[in-house]
Amino acid sequence: MTPDLPELLDAASVVTLPMRVRFRGVTAREAVLLHGPSGWAEWAPFVEYDDADAARWLAAAVEAGWGRLPSPVRGAVGVNATVPAVPAEQVGSVLARYDVTRTAKIKVAERGQTLADDLARVTEVRRVLGPGARLRVDANGAWSQDDALEALRTLAPLGLEYAEQPCATVEELAALRVALARAGVDVPVAADESVRRAEDPLRVAREHAADLVVVKVAPLGGVARAVEIVQECGLPAVVSSALDTSVGLAVGVRLAAALPDLDHDCGLGTAALLAADVVADPLVPRAGGLTTDRADAAREAVDPALLTAHRSDPERETWWRERLTRAFAHLSGI
Ligand SMILES: O=C(O)CCC(=O)C1=CC=C[C@@H](O)[C@@H]1C(=O)O
Ligand SMILES: [Mg+2]
């Protein structure tokens, strides 16, 4: 069932949530919470995304708020800590916000920083979490193929589970995998933007450009679509958030719980990066994981007082409502 536009606009609350640390260049996360007959849903396409992208995020919100989510095949999922591109001295305080010690994802290749900064940050995460922890890095496509080879050669001795989107294009990722193998650098490559922002999310698998895929519910158009994409790719998957509120994270947990195979911890701990949320008890990982029970409960626990307290200013609210109207016009093309 798809709501009409007046129903969607009526169901929408626009919020601005402050973040604890800068992430993806933002210090506040804006989101639209939608209350539909199937429960709360979130629509929060990154502000730089165009209306066609935003429509895919809307399809995901409509699935959660007006449709049905695929049934879980597991009741709990492991979660990684997410470490923004902070100075090494701040790593300890970031990690202290997570009840997670097994796996951490570390942002690298941040604009204005150097490989020495990345090395210091990853070294510090390894020191804090110890030799048994699984560490993955995410360059968000910022390295050239040569830079990626040099960086991963430098970081590999610290022990990396994988490198997420080390280069921007599918061609570079494919060539990098060959170059890494040739150089004897044992770091698997994961594709994120090459799946979530691609015209054809399966191309990365066809071109043998990745060892695993990172999937996010909203950019892929919903849980059911994301499950299909993972199956069609035929590669191991990691479910990750799109810097969601607890509502979006809860739906992410439902994707992780619905995948037939899940061998990696998921990037669903990002509530810890928000200084405010739309539920009183944010969906942060406990003992390294999240359960579907807690996720479903969080989605039911959206607090109207928090929606009011964090309501966006009138100018931003108008911007989001107009964007929602435009994205809705694209929805039928999805
Ligand atoms: O994967 C995680 O650990 C948390 C989520 C995360 O890192 C991201 C969420 C949203 C946008 C991104 O720039 C970023 C990513 O690239 O994976
Ligand atoms: Mg990523």
Image: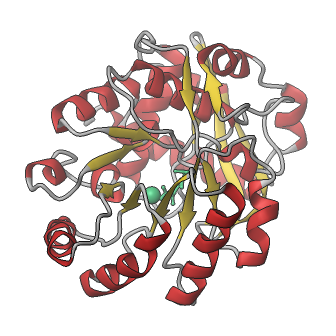
Q: Residue at x 14, y 75 (%)?
A: 182
Please name whichever residue, 9 or 156, is drawn nearer the observer in this view of the structure. 156
Q: Which residue is drawn at 42% across and 55% down?
A: 161
Quarter of the view holding residue 50: bottom left
Where residue 255 appears, as percent x and y from the top left, is: 44, 26
The quadrant of the rendered image in which ligand 2 is seen is: bottom left
- On the image, the x and y values in percent for residue 85 come to 62, 72
Q: Quadrant of residue 233?
A: top left
- Is the residue 46 above or below the residue 303 in the image? below
Tell whether 100 sits left or right of 220: right
279 versus 112 height, above or below: above
| 277 shown above or below 111 | above
Picture coordinates of residue 288 (x, y %)? Answer: 66, 35
Q: Can residue 4 be seen in this view?
A: no
The residue lying toward the viewer, choosing from 117 and 14, is 117
Color style of the picture: secondary structure
**Horizontal side of residue 224 vs 28, given as left or right:** left
Residue farthest toward the left in the current orientation of the protein: 206
Q: Residue at x 43, y 67 (%)?
A: 140
